[in-house]
Image: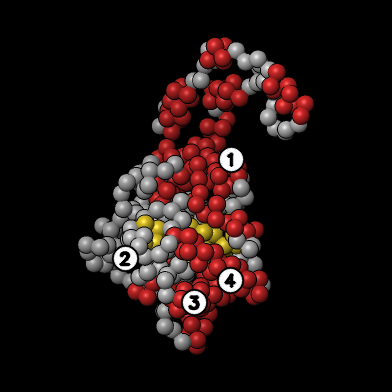
C-alpha cells in the first residue's frame, strides 16, 4: 500500500497539463500591477517538470511575439520544442489569442470589420502551424471578445453566420495541411464583453452540427465559465461526453456570480469537484486534464508551484474518493434499488407499434408509485461523510 506522501503524486498517465498563461500568470488584475517577475517559456516548462506535470499548453503569443518575423518565430519555436523535450513535457493543446490585442476590441471572427475577421482567421492559421510543429493534437478556440455591449452592434444571427464561416475555413485548412487537429470550442457567458456569443457549452453543442465538418469539432468546457453563471458544470460535461464531443476540459474553481476567478481546482466547491472527477473517471475520459487556473496574487513562484501541485493532488485525492464511492456497499445498494424495475414497467429503449400498444394499455398505480422511497438525503449524506473521511 502506498504511503500518503506518495499516493497522490502525478504521473504521465494522469495527463495533467497547465498553460504557459496559468503558471506564468504574474498576478496583474484590473486594479493592480504585476506582483511576480516574468519567466521565459523555457523556465515555465522547467517549473512544470519540477512539480510533475505531463503537458504544457499555449496561446500563440504566449510563445511567439505577435509581430515576430518568420526567422525569429522559427528560432523561438525550435528552442521551445527542445526545452520541452529536455524536460520530458509534451504539448497536447494549442490555442490562439484573439482577445488581447486592441484590434480585436469588437471581436475577431464575428467583428463587423471584414479586415479584422480575415486577420483573425490568418492569425489562427499561423497559431495552428505552431501547434502542429510542437506536436499538439487539440486546438482550442475561445471567443473571448466575440460578443457585444449593445445588440445595436449587429444582428446576432449574422454573428453566428460569421463564426460558422470562420470555423469551416479553419477545418478546411486543417485538412489541407494534414494536421489532424480536433477543434475544441470553449464557451463563456460574460467577461470581458458584456454578453458573449455562445455563452454555454450547450450553445456550442447546438452550433457544431451546423458546421461543414462537425466530426472535427467538439467542446472544451471550463469549470469557472459555467459556474460563474450559476450553472451545473457537470451537466454540461456529461452532455458533451454523451454526444462524443468532450475533446478537452479546463479544470479550475469559481464562486457563482463572481468575476472569472480561476481558483485552484477544488478550492471553492469541493463537492461539485468530486462529482466531476467521479464522472470523468467512471466514464473513462482519456483526454488531457488541463488546469486553467492561477495562483493567488499573494504568491511568489514557490507559491505557484504549491498551486500547481495542489491542483493535481486534489484531483488525485478526489479520484481515490470516487473509487471508494463506487465501491461503497451502502451507496451502491441505494443506487441499485433506485433503478430496479421490479414492477416490470415497459421498456422505452426501442419504439415499435407493438411496444407502443403495450405502453398505451399499461395501467399505472400512481399512489403505489408515490409510496416508493427516494432516499436522496441518505445518499447525499453518505457522500458527504465519505468526503469528510468519517467512519
Say which element carries label 3: helix
Is residue 256 visible in the rendered structure shown here? yes
Residue 350 percent across, percent down from the top left: 72, 33
From what the image shows, is residue 67 above or below residue 270?
below
Mark 3 or mark 1, whichever is nearer to me = 3
Residue 76 percent across, percent down from the top left: 48, 80
Seen at 74% across and 26% down, the residue is: 355
Q: Residues within 10 Å of mark 3 (few under 14, many from 20)?
A: some
Sequence-earlier tag: 3 or 2: 2
From what the image shows, is residue 178 above or below residue 188?
below
Label 4 belongs to which residue? 169
Seen at 51% across and 74% down, the residue is: 121
Q: Quadrant of the N terminus?
A: top right
Return the mark for residue 26: 2
Return the mark for residue 118: 3
Sequence-earlier tag: 4 or 2: 2
Give me the C-alpha separation between circle 3 and circle 4: 11 Å
Q: Quadrant of the C terminus?
A: top left
Amino acid at each position: 500500500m502506498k504511503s500518503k506522501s506518495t499516493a497522490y503524486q502525478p504521473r504521465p498517465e494522469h495527463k495533467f497539463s497547465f498553460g504557459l498563461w496559468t503558471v506564468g500568470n504574474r498576478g496583474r488584475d484590473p486594479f493592480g500591477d504585476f506582483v511576480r517577475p516574468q519567466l521565459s517559456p523555457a523556465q515555465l516548462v522547467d517549473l512544470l517538470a519540477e512539480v510533475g506535470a505531463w503537458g504544457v499548453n499555449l496561446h500563440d503569443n504566449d510563445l511567439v511575439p505577435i509581430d515576430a518575423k518568420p526567422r525569429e518565430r522559427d528560432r523561438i519555436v525550435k528552442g521551445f520544442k527542445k526545452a520541452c523535450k529536455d524536460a520530458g513535457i509534451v504539448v497536447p493543446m494549442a490555442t490562439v489569442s484573439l482577445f488581447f490585442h486592441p484590434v480585436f476590441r469588437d471581436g475577431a471572427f464575428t467583428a463587423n470589420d471584414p479586415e479584422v475577421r480575415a486577420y483573425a482567421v490568418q492569425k489562427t492559421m499561423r497559431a495552428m502551424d505552431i501547434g502542429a510543429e510542437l506536436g499538439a493534437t487539440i486546438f482550442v478556440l475561445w471567443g473571448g471578445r466575440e460578443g457585444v455591449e449593445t445588440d445595436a452592434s449587429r444582428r446576432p444571427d449574422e454573428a453566428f453566420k460569421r463564426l460558422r464561416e470562420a470555423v469551416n475555413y479553419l477545418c478546411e485548412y486543417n485538412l489541407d495541411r494534414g494536421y489532424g487537429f480536433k477543434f475544441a470550442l470553449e464557451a463563456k457567458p460574460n467577461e470581458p464583453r458584456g454578453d458573449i456569443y455562445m455563452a454555454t457549452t450547450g450553445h456550442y453543442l447546438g452550433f457544431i452540427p451546423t458546421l461543414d465538418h462537425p466530426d472535427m469539432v467538439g467542446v472544451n468546457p471550463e469549470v469557472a465559465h459555467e459556474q460563474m453563471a450559476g450553472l451545473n458544470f457537470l451537466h454540461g460535461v456529461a452532455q458533451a461526453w454523451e454526444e462524443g464531443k468532450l475533446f478537452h476540459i479546463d479544470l479550475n474553481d469559481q464562486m457563482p456570480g463572481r468575476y472569472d476567478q480561476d481558483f485552484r481546482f477544488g478550492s471553492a466547491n469541493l463537492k461539485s469537484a468530486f462529482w466531476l472527477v467521479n464522472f470523468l473517471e467512471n466514464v473513462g475520459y482519456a483526454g488531457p486534464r488541463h488546469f486553467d487556473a492561477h495562483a493567488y496574487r499573494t504568491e511568489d513562484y514557490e507559491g505557484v508551484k504549491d498551486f500547481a501541485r495542489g491542483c493535481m493532488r486534489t484531483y488525485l485525492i478526489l479520484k481515490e474518493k470516487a473509487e471508494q464511492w463506487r465501491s461503497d456497499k451502502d451507496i451502491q445498494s441505494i443506487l441499485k434499488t433506485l433503478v430496479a424495475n421490479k414492477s416490470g414497467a415497459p421498456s422505452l429503449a426501442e419504439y415499435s407499434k407493438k411496444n407502443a400498444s403495450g405502453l398505451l394499455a399499461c395501467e399505472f398505480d400512481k399512489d403505489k408509485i408515490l409510496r416508493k422511497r427516494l432516499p436522496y438525503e441518505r445518499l447525499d449524506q453518505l457522500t458527504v461523510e465519505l468526503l469528510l473521511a468519517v467512519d
